[in-house]
């Protein structure tokens, strides 16, 4: 009687070594054609997908202690909230609709601002992968029990002009690292709002009011789900609040938010 030999299904050693050699050769060829450069300033660096020492030092990463709701680093006042968590005065005075937000870095100046602008306006889609990796690390506690990632959608007219939604690209990159699935059709933008840049907090909230919806036929997909909204920048939180409110009305169990950068000091 013939016996099946499992070793027949294994990749031969010589083939595995050849594949690794080809991968190394491909990497060398890529470095020759496109030498590794800093993602922010484009100075030469040792490997692809990183920052030079100067930009790394200038990157204002957000680390604890920070407000557990708003993710803002503490600089002056601390206040203890429920369950012993530390909340900022802003979170206590005006709690956001979403439960928590996490960000990689401050947006006000430096490399974080450069990266966001190059991804959003500079046709630099390749930046989404390293930025998404940083976001997955910053939002690890949110992603641990998340059911869905939902990028902040663009209105179809703006998407047609720009041909690129930076939030969707970042969500795809975060999903690749975290294995949390992305859903781009559950939350839609039904109102072509003017850009938020330059508006006050109150005007931002008014501008974005009624901008989002969850189609009736798809509301069952939101019911009982823990959702993480994904965007490139948080300024006042008006956009994230408006999106979270619609998802909660559709039956979501909890809505958190994950952004690459956030404004800490509003003008």
Image (cartoon, grey):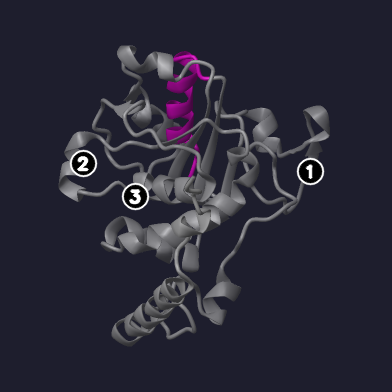
Vertical side of 159 occupied by 32: above or below? below
- Could you say which quadrant of the image residue 100 lies in? top right
Bounds of the magenta segment? 233-252
Horizontal arrangement in the rendering, residue 3 relative to residue 76 (left or right): left
Residue assigned mark 1: 78
Q: Which residue is mark 2?
A: 158
Q: Is residue 196 above or below residue 183?
A: below
Residue visible at 52% across and 75% down in the picture: 55
Q: Residue at x 79, y 27 (%)?
A: 82
Q: Check if residue 216 falls in the magenta segment.
A: no
Which is in the foreground here, disc 3 or disc 1?
3
Tell me the CA gap for discs 3 and 1.
Answer: 34 Å
What is the CA distance from the residue labelled 2 to the residue labelled 3? 12 Å
Badge nearest the viewer, 2 or 3: 3
Is label 1 in a helix, a strand or a loop? loop
Rendered image: mark on residue 247: none
Closer to the camera: disc 1 or disc 2? 2
Q: Position of residue 25 (x, y in %)?
A: 37, 83
Q: In the displayed image of the protein, which residue is found farthest to the front?
A: 1
Give the vertical position of 45 relative to 246 (above or below). Answer: below
Residue 136 in view, yes or no: yes
Q: Earlier in the sequence, mark 3 or mark 1?
A: 1
> Please, what is the dominant secondary structure of the magenta stretch?
helix
From the viewer's perspective, is residue 154 above or below residue 177?
A: above
Circle 3 residue: 166
Closer to the camera in the image, 98 or 94 = 98
């Amino acid at each position: 009687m013939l016996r099946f030999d499992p070793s027949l299904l294994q990749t031969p050693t010589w083939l595995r070594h050849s594949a690794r050699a080809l991968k190394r050769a491909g990497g060398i060829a890529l470095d020759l054609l496109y030498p590794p450069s800093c993602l922010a300033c484009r100075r030469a660096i040792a490997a692809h997908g990183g920052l030079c020492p100067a930009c790394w030092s200038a990157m204002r990463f957000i680390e604890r202690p920070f407000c557990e709701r708003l993710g803002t680093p503490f600089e002056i006042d601390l206040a203890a909230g429920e369950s012993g968590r530390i909340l900022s005065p802003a979170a206590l005075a005006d709690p956001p609709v979403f439960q928590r937000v996490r960000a990689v870095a401050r947006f006000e100046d430096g490399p974080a601002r450069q990266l966001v602008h190059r991804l959003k306006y500079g046709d630099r889609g390749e930046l989404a992968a390293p930025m998404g990796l940083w976001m997955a690390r910053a939002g690890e506690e949110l992603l641990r029990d998340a059911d869905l990632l939902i990028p902040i959608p663009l209105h179809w007219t703006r998407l047609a002009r720009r041909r690129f939604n930076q939030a969707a690209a970042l969500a795809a990159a975060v999903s690749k690292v975290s294995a949390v699935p992305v859903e781009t059709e559950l939350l839609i933008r039904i109102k072509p709002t003017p850009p938020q840049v330059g508006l006050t907090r109150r005007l931002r909230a008014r501008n974005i009011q009624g901008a989002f919806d969850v189609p009736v036929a798809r509301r069952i997909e939101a019911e009982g789900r823990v959702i993480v909204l994904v965007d490139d920048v948080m300024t006042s939180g008006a956009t994230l609040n408006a999106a979270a409110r619609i998802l909660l009305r559709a039956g979501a169990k909890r809505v958190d938010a994950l952004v690459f950068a956030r404004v800490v000091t509003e003008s």
